[in-house]
Image (cartoon, rainbow, N blue to C red):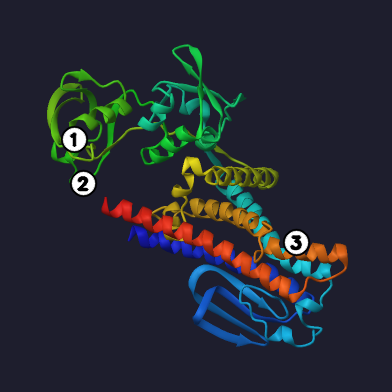
């Protein structure tokens, strides 16, 4: 049921973004009296789930949820339908319109994505406020790191002072990507500063260990907060509120140290000393081959809620949107560095649903929708043939030279763009399938 809720949120998110993006093309096309033959949510190769013709336009829903499209008469697009182009240009065709009109039609979808993202963030921040992790509070007691990060040079208890010479932002949400793109990170360790150098090999190692969480707050007092049903912790009789003191007589310094110690006892048992209501008791606990007991520790909430009025949220939302876009671009820079193998960690449509909560959470839903909207605007603006940005390049060239690109040139460009996009989709889908196999069968 949890997965179905996540998938439902993803489908709703994509439907909103696709319909409004395509509406951004549709409305200016109709404004300039250009005929629109089709308006589709999702793609419809071979057949559509629903379709109805109203006036000159066929509206429908395709079965392949990878986007959507409007088919504009007289325009070479991904459909590669050239029959109409063999006829003389008609006044109601895209190819008959002035270059500036074409440009408005092409950039309409991107414009809508930008405005939609800005609007959603404005409403979310003025309704819920902006929630982010406070850097000062998150690392107040120091930080803990997974084994890959430790191999890179970090140690439990470190506090991050600066990244590439820049003081760490008060918002810790983006610290991980900043670190992965850094040349060096300065940490405070035992009262003195130490610089940790980065290279692609270290980044690769950290990414491969990312499932365990790169950075966590240092939890010195390990107290049980919740227990997974039928877990080893429940079978051993652990209860919420239990404070874990030692394993086989050795004191527990932190939760991270506890997890590392468990790794040495796979498929074995430990004697766990527990403080419960002021009394110390021993519990013999079996450790599974996953080296986990099946409980979550009590962790302080480090989130800050920045409450804003609607007027305050307007400029704040714009700046946040630009920041989110910058970090998405940073992630692309990391992905295109093959030595880091970051491309193996890219999620596509088959795993994108996991970005949503297993419970319907409107705040998270709208935040993700706004983030994805500005990302789609950026992707579509790239000068790749077949994308809106690719079409825009040819229109701008037409405005400069006064000549339209030949149909043959447009066909070749469209084919090249199609190959590029499909190649990327094959990589992303292949990566999704491989990761799903790894997650479910390992």
Which numbered disc flags the more N-terminal residue, 3 or 2?
2
The residue positioned 63% from the left and 80% from the top of the image is 38
31 on left or right of 169:
right
The residue positioned 69% from the left and 70% from the top of the image is 25
Depth check, front residue: 169 or 421: 421
Measured as percent of width and height from the top left, residue 365 is found at 50, 55
Which numbered disc flags the more N-terminal residue, 1 or 2?
2
Q: Residues within 10 Å of mark 3 (few under 14, many from 20)?
A: some
Residue indicated by mark 3 = 393
Measured as percent of width and height from the top left, residue 399 is found at 85, 65
Q: Nearer the viewer, mark 1 or mark 2?
A: 1
Q: Nearer the viewer, mark 1 or mark 3?
A: 3
Measured as percent of width and height from the top left, residue 222 is found at 29, 27
In this rendering, is residue 131 above or below 139?
below
The residue positioned 59% from the left and 42% from the top of the image is 330
Helix, strand or loop for disc 3: helix
Residue indicated by mark 2 = 229
Q: Residue 266 shows which numbered tag?
A: 1
Mark 1 vs 3: CB contact within 8 A = no
Which numbered disc flags the more N-terminal residue, 1 or 3?
1
């Amino acid at each position: 049921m949890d997965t179905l809720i996540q998938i439902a949120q993803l489908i709703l998110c994509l439907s909103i973004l696709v319909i409004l993006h395509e509406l951004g093309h549709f409305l200016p096309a109709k404004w300039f009296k250009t005929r629109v033959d089709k308006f589709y949510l999702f793609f419809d190769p071979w057949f559509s789930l629903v379709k109805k013709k109203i006036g000159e336009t066929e509206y429908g829903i395709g079965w392949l949820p990878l986007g959507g499209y409007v088919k504009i008469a007289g325009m070479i697009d991904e459909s590669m339908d050239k029959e109409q182009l063999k006829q003389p240009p008609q006044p109601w065709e895209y190819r008959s319109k002035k270059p500036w009109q074409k440009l408005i039609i092409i950039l309409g979808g991107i414009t809508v994505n930008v405005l939609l993202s800005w609007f959603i963030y404005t409403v979310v921040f003025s309704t819920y406020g902006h929630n982010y992790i406070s850097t000062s509070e998150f690392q107040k007691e120091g930080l803990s790191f997974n084994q890959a990060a430790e191999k890179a040079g970090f140690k439990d208890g470190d506090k991050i002072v600066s990244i590439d010479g820049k003081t760490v932002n008060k918002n810790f949400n983006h610290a991980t990507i900043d670190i992965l793109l850094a040349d060096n990170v300065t940490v405070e360790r035992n009262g003195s500063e130490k610089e940790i150098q980065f290279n692609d090999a270290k980044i690769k190692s950290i990414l491969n260990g990312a499932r365990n969480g790169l950075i966590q707050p240092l939890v010195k007092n390990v107290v049980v907060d919740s227990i997974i049903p039928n877990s080893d912790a429940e079978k051993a009789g652990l209860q919420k509120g239990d404070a874990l003191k030692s394993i086989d007589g050795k004191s527990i310094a932190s939760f991270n140290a506890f997890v590392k110690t468990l790794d040495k006892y796979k498929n074995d048992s430990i004697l766990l000393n527990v403080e419960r209501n002021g009394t110390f008791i021993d519990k013999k606990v079996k450790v599974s081959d996953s080296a986990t007991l099946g409980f979550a520790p009590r962790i302080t909430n480090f989130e800050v809620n920045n409450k804003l009025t609607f007027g305050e949220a307007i400029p704040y939302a714009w700046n946040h949107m630009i920041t989110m876009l910058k970090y998405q671009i940073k992630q692309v820079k990391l992905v295109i560095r093959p030595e880091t193998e970051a491309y193996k960690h890219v999620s596509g449509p088959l795993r994108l649903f996991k970005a949503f909560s297993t419970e319907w959470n409107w705040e998270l839903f709208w935040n993700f929708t706004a983030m994805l909207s500005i990302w789609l605007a950026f992707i579509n603006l790239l000068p790749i043939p077949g994308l809106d940005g690719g079409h825009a390049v040819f229109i701008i060239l037409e405005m400069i030279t006064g000549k339209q690109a030949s149909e043959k040139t447009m066909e070749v460009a469209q084919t090249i763009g199609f190959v590029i996009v499909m190649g990327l989709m094959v990589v992303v889908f292949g990566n999704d399938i491989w990761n799903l196999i790894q997650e479910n069968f390992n």
